[in-house]
Image (spheres, helix red, strand yellow):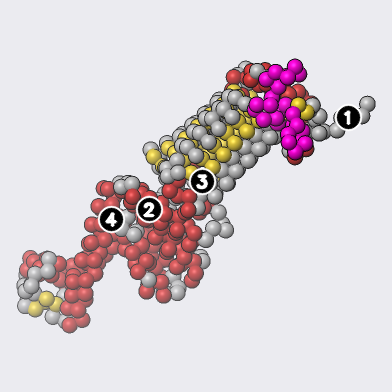
Amino acid sequence: MAEKQITCCKCIDHGWKTYEEPIYTDAHENKYCLFHAPVDQKKCGNGKPMPKKLFKNFVFQYIEKRHDASKNLLCNISGTVFPDDIDFSAHYSKDKRLENISLQHAVFSGKAKFEGLTIKGLVLANAKIYGEANFKGVVFEDDPGLDHLTFRSRAYFEKAEFQKGCCFTGSIFEKVAWFSECIFSGTMVFHSIKASRNALRMHKLTKDSLSFVLFPSLEAHQFSFKECPDWPDDFGFENEEKTSKLTLEELYRALKQKAVEEHDQPQVSRWHYREKLMQLKQLLGAKTPESLSLLETVENDSFCVWHHAYQWLRLACMWPHDKWRALTWWYWWASGFGERPRRAGIVLLLLLAPVLAIFLSAELCPVQTFWGRVLAMLQHLMFVTNPKAAPNMPFLAFVVVLLTRILIPLQFTLFALAVRNRFRR
């Protein structure tokens, strides 16, 4: 017996493999099956409107039949129009598992609930969900297709686990979307999305999960990061090799501006540091790419202080030395962009050391006792107009003036700024 030819226009468009009897023909002579017919045209054989519960049972029976026929490879019900709430959680409450299913271009007129399920494969690309979308506690074993998905109401992904990441490219969030306490084990791409300010609530995420979140600077205002106990060293597109340092700089500048507007000082400090670090990487990478590895070592807090200091000095002495002409370099080297008080304190002590050595060992005019030398040094450091004594040698006198009148005051300012920023956090 020959197979019936598929006549439903949507079944043809979405690549359905099964024949479904058309129940509705529109004004353009397009035929629609029960799955794809408009909500008000879903009718039983007697012409009466089909009860919504009966339609849901019909859908679940079809899914189970297709899974059995394909040995759980894929059930394609793309383009299905759901007239009311659909609860996958309740139907699969026994084993809490949903196999591969394609719901591309589907229309959910009510709520869509997948809460607590383990989903092997799910495609919702180009679908529209008019009611609340509930994905709380869902475990996505594979990368779900959630690109160009429209959420007309709230979306809940709280405590969901994305084992292979997810791509939300082109998706629309008309209300708030909660990603609180999610676990991201793969790249989470939020590119070209549309949402209101702070609509994407990335709250209580771990350091590892945050490292997988990717979004450009234009979408920065749409994200909210609260109660995140720790932050990764590499954030956003830093893990992507093709992303330029200039793009990263713009991303961190956008996040810093957002934090400033929200008076979130700890975040201001965090994003300010990353922004300036990207500027420094552009400076170093353009001259000596190998210096970037040294920079990463200095920025790695897992090493001891002496190893940090050694690499820090190596980076300063690395050829070419034209980086010394850049204020960004000195800002980082002397204080970590005003965010590293320990580094600023070490540099301050290094600047004080030659002043101490000069006043304790060099010939002074007039000649002083030990405590007289100490007093003279303190007077120079405190900007006393007529200090008690000064080095007799002109060169040493010049060094003292340079250090006590210019370099030490500047470094002390950077040290005070770094301490302030640390306490502000």
Whichever of callouts 1 and 4 sits on the residue coming sooner in the sequence is 1
Q: Pointer 3: residues within 10 angstroms few (<14), some, or many (20+)?
A: some
Q: Position of residue 163 (x, y in %)?
A: 58, 37
Which mark is drawn over residue 194? 3
Q: Position of residue 134 (x, y in %)?
A: 53, 29
From this viewpoint, which residue is outermost toward the bottom? 394
- Mark 4–mark 3 CB contact (< 8 Å): no
The residue under label 4 is 418
Mark 3 element type: strand
In whole angstroms, how far apart are the C-alphas of marks 2 and 3? 21 Å
Give the answer, above or below, for where 39 lies relative to 217. above
Give me the disc on residue 3: 1
The x, y position of residue 377, in whole percent, is 13, 68
Q: Residues within 10 Å of mark 2 (few under 14, many from 20)?
A: many
Residue type for callout 2: Lys
Question: Residue type at mark 4?
Answer: Ala
Q: Earlier in the sequence, mark 4 or mark 3?
A: 3
Instruction: Check the picture and name the quadrant holding the N terminus.
Output: top right
Q: Is label 2 in a helix, a strand or a loop?
A: helix
* Dominant SS in magenta: loop
Going by the numbered disc 1, the residue's amino acid type is Glu
Q: Which residues are magenta?
A: 24-49
Whether residues under marks 2 and 4 lie with C-beta atoms below 8 angstroms apart, the answer is no
Q: Quadrant of residue 54?
A: top right
Q: Which residue is mark 2?
A: 256
Relative image position of residue 418 (x, y in whole percent): 28, 55
Q: Is residue 163 above or below residue 277?
A: above
Residue sitting at x 16%, y 81%: 393
Three-letter code, disc 3: Lys
